[in-house]
Image (spheres, rainbow, N blue to C red):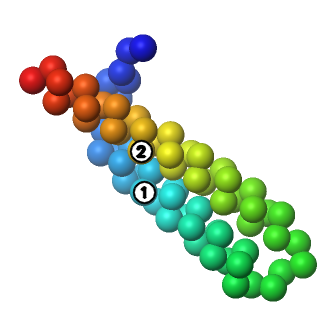
Amino acid sequence: MKVSPQATKGHLIAGIILVVLSLISMLGSLLLEIRTVAPLIFFIFFFGVWGGVELGRFLEYSLSKKTES
């Protein structure tokens, strides 16, 4: 599999922000007594997966850059 040359520190920052949004959604669903927490559960999954993908891209890029050197 070819490593994406577009993976930059922007992916790292975006991944961290998305994971933080996921954690905020999780805490909100636990602390707030909302009758319908389904949207928050969706946001936990969506932001968590998307953040993980972005962090994975950056990690893959940084590891391949170190092995090429």
Q: Is residue 42 above or below residue 61?
A: below
The residue that appears at 46% across and 42% down in the rendered structure is 54
Identify the residue position indicated by label 1 in the image.
Answer: 16
Identify the residue position indicated by label 2 in the image.
Answer: 55
Is label 2 in a helix, a strand or a loop? helix
In the rendering, at what x and y percent does residue 44 appear? 66, 60
Q: Residue 59 occupies which quadrant of the picture?
A: top left
Tell me: 68 left or right of 36: left
Residue type pointed to by label 1: Ile
The quadrant of the image that shows the C terminus is: top left
The residue that appears at 79% across and 63% down in the rendered structure is 39
Tag 2: Cα neighbours inside 10 Å, few (<14), some, or many (≥20)?
many
The residue that appears at 45% across and 50% down in the rendered structure is 15
Question: How far is the residue under mark 1 from the one under mark 2?
Answer: 7 Å
Q: Pointers 1 and 2 in contact (CB under 8 A)?
A: yes
Tell me: 29 left or right of 49: right
Tag 1: Cα neighbours inside 10 Å, few (<14), some, or many (≥20)?
some
The residue that appears at 37% across and 53% down in the rendered structure is 13
Tell me: 55 left or right of 5: right
In the rendering, at what x and y percent does residue 26 appear? 65, 69
Q: Residue 50 occupies which quadrant of the picture?
A: top right
Q: Is residue 50 above or below residue 26?
A: above
